Amino acid sequence: MKQMSHIDHDIPSTPGKFKMEKSSYMNRIRWHYSSLAKLTFWSFVLFLGLILVFFFKSPTSTSSPLPSDLSRRSLRTYSWGGPAWEKRVRASSRTRSRNGLSVLVTGAAGFVGTHVSAALKRRGDGVLGLDNFNDYYDPSLKRARQALLERSGVFIVEGDINDIALLKKLFEVVAFTHVMHLAAQAGVRYAMENPSSYVHSNIAGLVSILEVCKSANPQPAIVWASSSSVYGLNTKVPFSEKDRTDQPASLYAATKKAGEEIAHTYNHIYGLSLTGLRFFTVYGPWGRPDMAYFFFTKDILKGKSVPIFEAANHGTVARDFTYIDDIVKGCLAALDTAEKSTGSGGKKKGPAQLRVFNLGNTSPVPVSDLVSILERLLKVKAKRSVTKLPRNGDVQFTHANISSAQRELGYKPTTDLQTGLKKFVRWYLSYYDSGKKSAQ
């Protein structure tokens, strides 16, 4: 800024009245252009500086100073560390059985993360949660899940999966045998509003987890959440793990497909044991408010119109709805059958396990039938509004072939949609307690 002040002093405030000393015409021209060049140069520098500050400024905080580590520019500032914090981390991760697993669960305050963490803790495994409690949907629901887990002895560290310093610290404190990576930016339609959040969480976040795991000694085995969305515009049904997945219909699907390719790379180079799970429309108690069954329930009770999507030529829109307890069984089976990673200190010692499984229910149900079941359970007639399926990334149908998961994981879903929705509605009415809590 001192250079700018110097330029300002050289330029008169009233150029028309400025009296030049006698000099040649060429001297005047040189003076004019050198001053103009300096002004242009420093203006450009200032402009470039403003652009850089704007580009690297964290979207999550408008008042905090710019972090020195640009890889952390989109992270909130979380409080972690210290003897008391480390004691809680160790206690939560401690196993109660001789052959128990010690599992880091990312996205632990999420829908699937909460149920998986609770199930692991119930059977005696050590479980440490990690979650950033973002506001993609009502954070109070995530806090309620956190309280539920804390009562069962699971501590959730509040932090971001892109915070490498935090991840390294966790692995310093605990030698995790497994990582259940469930943290992700979910939802198909939201990608049209905030695409960068999907790249940040689903791609950069996965790489951050894998980077820390590859350097850990010993390396943990990793099970992570892919999605049935990777099948995209595939028309062959039921969807098999051997089918093409190179035609994503949404950015969300594209980031999950990218995750599968990234997993292959880290398995190939660093010997990480990796298992991807393609979830098919998971539902149940403590579910996600952005899912159709959840907001249909809310809207039916409030007397609002419920949108029933229909595909081209009046085609039926159907989903392979999978109850949360069945998904949890698949997740735990994937952890239990995961082989050890083969690397050490970031160097591969031999071939490592690489798998991907469909976890679905194998029986797609039309969305209109979902509404009919909710009507019976809630004893309220829905106001249906039939509308065309928008071009926002949604696909017409999903249908899982689970033969591979049955054979290798012993996976066998047992809950039909009627039974599962009955359990969800019971939880929903209890949780929102006739209006005491607001279903946002």
Image (cartoon, rainbow, N blue to C red):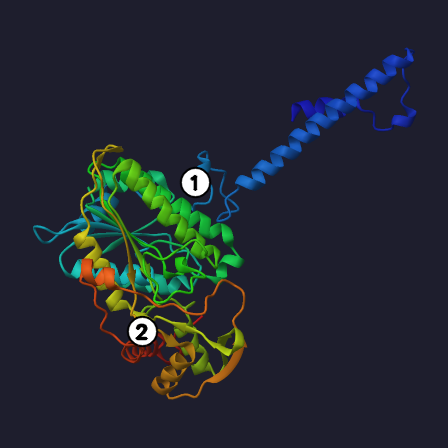
Crowdedness near tag 1: few (<14), some (14–19) or many (≥20) residues, C-alpha within 10 Å? some
What residue type is disc 1 on? Arg
Q: Which of the labelled discs sits on residue 363, or is there none?
A: 2
Q: Is residue 399 visible?
A: yes
Residue 389 lies left or right of residue 34; in this view the side is left
Tell whether label 2 touches label 1 (CB within 8 Å): no
Earlier along the polypeptide chain: callout 1 or callout 2? 1
Residue at label 1? Answer: 72
x and y percentages locating residue 226 in the rendered image: 34, 55
Kind of element beneath mark 1 = helix
Residue 230 lies left or right of residue 276; in this view the side is right
Kind of element beneath mark 2 = loop
Residue 210 vertical placement versus 294 (above, below):
above
| Quadrant in which residue 53 is drawn | top right
Crowdedness near tag 2: few (<14), some (14–19) or many (≥20) residues, C-alpha within 10 Å? some
Residue drawn at x 39%, y 53% is 256
The quadrant of the rendering that contains the C terminus is bottom left
x and y percentages locating residue 343 in the rendered image: 22, 36
What residue type is disc 2 on? Ser
The quadrant of the rendering that contains the N terminus is top right
